[in-house]
Image (cartoon, grey):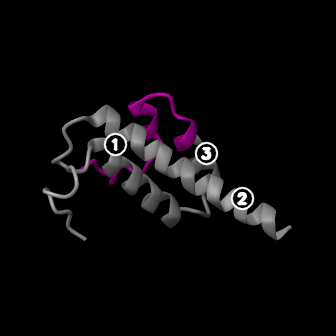
Amino acid sequence: MERDPLIQSPRTALDQGLEHGFRWAQAHLTDRARLGRVARAHTAAEVVGNLDPTFQMPDEVADSVAYWSGFAHGVQRVLRATADASTSQA
């Protein structure tokens, strides 16, 4: 869905990272150890180091640190949501 620039501000690098990290984590739910390493990363290099070498940040992202921070937080959201879901089913 495209955003109307008159109604909403453009997506920031952080927003893009959150979205991409969330989607990436959902696609890799079976590798919880790697998801945990990404979510706990303290630097952009640590995040990237735990991803597939083929995964690339989009070219249009201006702030790589914000993007990778958002990515890690997106992964963390999935981990929390799946942990909460499994706890409530117990």
Q: Which is more toward the observer, 24 or 48?
A: 24
Disc 3 marks a residue whose amino acid type is: Gly
Instruction: Say which mark, if any, is on residue 84.
Output: 2
Whether residue 11 is in magenta: the answer is no
Disc 2 marks a residue whose amino acid type is: Asp
Q: Which is more toward the observer, 16 or 50?
A: 16
Q: Which residue is mark 1?
A: 14
Question: Under tag 3, what secondary structure?
Answer: helix
Q: Which is more toward the observer, 9 or 63?
A: 9
x and y, in percent, of residue 70 in the image: 40, 43
> Hey, which quadrant is residue 87 in on the image?
bottom right
Going from N to C along the chain, the mark reached first, 1 or 3, is 1
Going from N to C along the chain, the mark reached first, 2 or 1, is 1
Instruction: Say which mark, if any, is on residue 36.
Output: 3
Quadrant that contains the N terminus: bottom left
Residue at the far left in the pictured view: 6
Q: Which residue is rendered at x = 49% and y = 44% of the image?
A: 73
Q: Residues within 10 Å of mark 2 (few under 14, many from 20)?
A: few
Quadrant that contains the C terminus: bottom right
Residue at the far top in the pictured view: 42
Magenta region: which residues? 38-58
Question: Under tag 2, what secondary structure?
Answer: helix
> Hey, which quadrant is residue 78 in on the image?
bottom right
The reply to whether callout 1 and callout 3 are in contact (CB within 8 Å) is: no
Mark 2 → mark 1, Cα distance in angstroms: 24 Å
Question: Under tag 1, what secondary structure?
Answer: helix
Q: Which residue is rendered at x = 47% and y = 50% of the image?
A: 74
Mark 2 → mark 3, Cα distance in angstroms: 15 Å
Q: Is residue 23 left or right of residue 41?
A: left
x and y, in percent, of residue 5 in the image: 14, 56
Mark 1 → mark 3, Cα distance in angstroms: 19 Å
